[in-house]
Structure formats: C-alpha cells, structure tokens
C-alpha cells in the first residue's frame, strides 16, 4: 500500500475501532462490564474509571458486581452509576455494589438495534469523509507531483480500502444486532 494512502486507512481503522468500543458499551441482555467503561468516580477529587477503584466481576449472566478497594467509595460509585445513562439502580450490602440487569423487552431490543445501526451509519459516514479527504489530497498532488494515471490508481486503492471498511462495519453492525435480538 502506498504511504500516501496508508494514513487514510489508519484513520478509517480508528473510526472502526471507535465504533467497536461504542458497541461494547451497549448491553445485550446480559451483564457486560464494558457498560461501565465511560463512568468516572470522584476519587479524591479526580474523575477515575470504576475499574481502577474496585474489582468489577460478572458472577451471574445478568449481574455485575463491583467490590471497591475502599469502602468509602461505595457512595461515590453509586452516585456515578445513578447519574449515568445505564438505567440500572445499584444495590449494595455495605461491601459490594450489585447491578442487576433485567431481561430486555422486545421493544427495548429494537431500540438498541436502531442505536447500533445509527452508530454503524455514523462510522460509515466518517470512513467516507476520510476517503473524500484522501481524494482531495490526491487531486492537489496531481497539480504538482504525480501523473493523472498514478492519481487514478491511488484513488482506486483508496476506494478499495473504503469498501473494505464499509463491509466490515456492516458485518459488525449485523453481528451486534443479532447479539441483541438473541433471547
């Protein structure tokens, strides 16, 4: 792959990786500790990820258990969870916090699938914007450095990379949708 094109492939990969991380935070009927990835707890004045202030485990398919390393953090962790968009009320027994995920309703599953498809579409738009930026950069090169035939070859190569990422996004969206719809 030409180095003038590879930078755009790297940017597309980053867009795809971001979408995958977004998918990880969408819960699909069973407990997934990644739903907590974006939550921050006030730890001595510093916003800190929950995974860094306690042990996060999944003892049962629909329960996440958080065992803070300091008991004084229980209230802060509960506050962070309640302020988030997870939609689950934490319960604690003084030493650990449990998040019990209810079974998803059919309607909620369909809403989650719509959300997944929207995130996939956003990723495809980002990939196409990166392709457009690459094509614009190639057209500028055409005026000075390289021939039109080389430009055409590079544009074709960029299009192939774009097609690959769009196909990967479609597959990832479909896999996540199937995962959510599975009862």
Image (cartoon, rainbow, N blue to C red):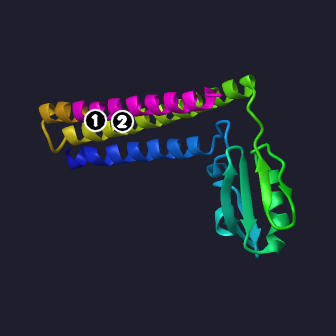
Nearer-the-camera pick, 171 or 154: 171
The tally of labels here is 2
Query: Which of the 4 image quarters holds residue 95?
Result: bottom right
The N terminus is located in which quarter?
top left
Residue 64: percent from left, percent from top: 71, 52
Residue 75: percent from left, percent from top: 85, 65
Q: Which residue sits at x=67%, y=44%? A: 61
**Disc 1 designates what residue?**
158
Stretch in magenta: 156-183
Q: Is residue 174 magenta?
A: yes
Tell me the crowding category of disc 1: few under 14, some 14 to 19, or many 20 or more residues within 10 angstroms, Cα based.
many
Q: Which residue sits at x=42%, y=36%? A: 127
Residue 107: percent from left, percent from top: 74, 23
Q: Which residue sits at x=54%, y=47%? A: 21
Tell me the crowding category of disc 2: few under 14, some 14 to 19, or many 20 or more residues within 10 angstroms, Cα based.
many
**Disc 2 designates what residue?**
131
Nearer-the-camera pick, 126 or 177: 177
Residue 115: percent from left, percent from top: 63, 31
Q: Up-down: is 161 above or below 111?
A: below
* Element under disc 1: helix
């Amino acid at each position: 792959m030409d180095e003038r094109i590879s930078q755009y492939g790297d940017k597309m990969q980053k867009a795809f990786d971001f979408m995958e991380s977004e998918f990880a935070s969408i819960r699909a009927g069973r407990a997934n500790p990644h739903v907590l990835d974006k939550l921050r707890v006030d730890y001595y004045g510093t916003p800190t990820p929950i995974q860094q202030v306690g042990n996060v485990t999944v003892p049962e398919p629909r329960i996440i258990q958080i065992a803070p390393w300091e008991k004084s953090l229980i209230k802060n962790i509960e506050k962070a969870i309640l302020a988030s968009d997870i939609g689950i009320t934490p319960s604690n027994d003084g030493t650990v916090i449990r998040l019990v995920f209810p079974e998803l309703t059919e309607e909620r599953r369909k809403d989650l699938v719509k959300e997944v498809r929207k995130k996939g579409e956003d990723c495809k738009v980002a990939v196409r914007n990166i392709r457009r930026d690459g094509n614009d950069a190639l057209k500028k090169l055409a005026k000075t450095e390289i021939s039109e035939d080389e430009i055409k070859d590079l544009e074709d190569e960029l299009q192939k990379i774009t097609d690959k990422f769009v196909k990967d996004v479609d597959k990832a969206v479909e896999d996540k949708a199937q995962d959510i719809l599975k009862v």
